[in-house]
Amino acid sequence: MKITLIKGDITKIKVDVVVNAANSSLLGGGGVDGAIHRAGGPMILHECQDIRNRQGKCKTGEAVITTAGNLPAKKVIHTVGPVYNDGNRLEKEKQLLADCYSNSLKLAEANDLKTIAFPNISTGIYRFPKSIAADIEIESVLNYKSETIEEVIFVCFDDENYQLYKEKLK
Ligand code: ADP
């Protein structure tokens, strides 16, 4: 499994699947979620609504899959990161953040998707400290032993995350 680091906009990346930092409603939000729905078009929201109708909200740490609409990717995996709670439940939140990455990889495998791009989940509106999040995100991906996934791309949008990842992936 090759690991690649990119600084940029995840909506522009041509991979089998891009991961969205969704919220549990699955009905869209700000940050990367807003960018994916804007660039991908209404088909994504439509499929999210179908999932809502079938199974209700998406729990933190879990993941669901939809079309990628107009994005260059084939599919979008929506996963819900934990909201940082000032370190009060840090161990639990770290586990949930790691679950976002492993459950997304599992879902990609189940759908025979071989290249996957992740944003830095929970480090925006959900306020997770970026350095702690980067450690967990990298560890969760490196610990995931996949027979079928060929490439995992970490897509950092902001410079702080990009520098942290560059350092930690050395
Ligand atoms: P969360 O609610 O999980 O914190 P956000 O979308 O607010 O989600 O932020 C998660 C990360 O996504 C942040 O590091 C932010 O810089 C990044 N981000 C925002 N827009 C994009 C984009 N278009 N492509 C990739 N990453 C993005």
Image: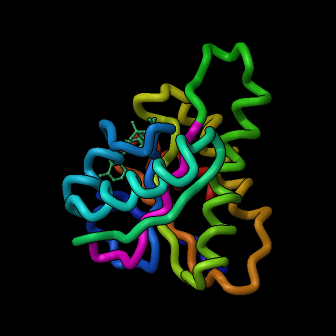
- Whether residue 5 is visible, yes or no, is no
From the top left corner, tell me how far across and down residue 49 is, in percent: 38, 52
Q: Quadrant of ligand 1?
A: top left
User: Which quadrant does the N terminus fall into?
Assistant: bottom right
Residue at figure coordinates x 22%, y 59% from the top left: 42
From the top left corner, tell me how far across and down residue 50 is, in percent: 42, 57
Residue at figure coordinates x 57%, y 78% from the top left: 151
**In this view, 52 is above or below 118:** above
**Magenta span includes 88:** no
Q: How many marks?
A: 0
Q: Quadrant of residue 140?
A: bottom right
From the top left corner, tell me how far across and down residue 18 is, in percent: 43, 66
- Whether residue 54 is visible, yes or no, is yes
From the top left corner, tell me how far across and down residue 3 is, in percent: 59, 72
Q: Nearer the viewer, residue 79 or 98?
A: 79
User: Which quadrant does the C terminus fall into?
Assistant: bottom right
Residue at figure coordinates x 69%, y 61% from the top left: 141
**Left or right, residue 38 beside residue 67:** left
**Magenta span includes 79:** yes
**Left or right, residue 103 beside residue 113:** right
Q: Nearer the viewer, residue 38 or 27?
A: 27
Q: Nearer the viewer, residue 137 or 79?
A: 79
Q: Residue furthest front?
A: 53
Coloring scheme used: rainbow
**In this view, 110 is above or below 124:** below
**In this view, 12 is above or below 95:** below
Q: Quadrant of residue 72?
A: bottom left
**Residue range highlighted in magenta:** 71-81
Residue at figure coordinates x 38%, y 61% from the top left: 47
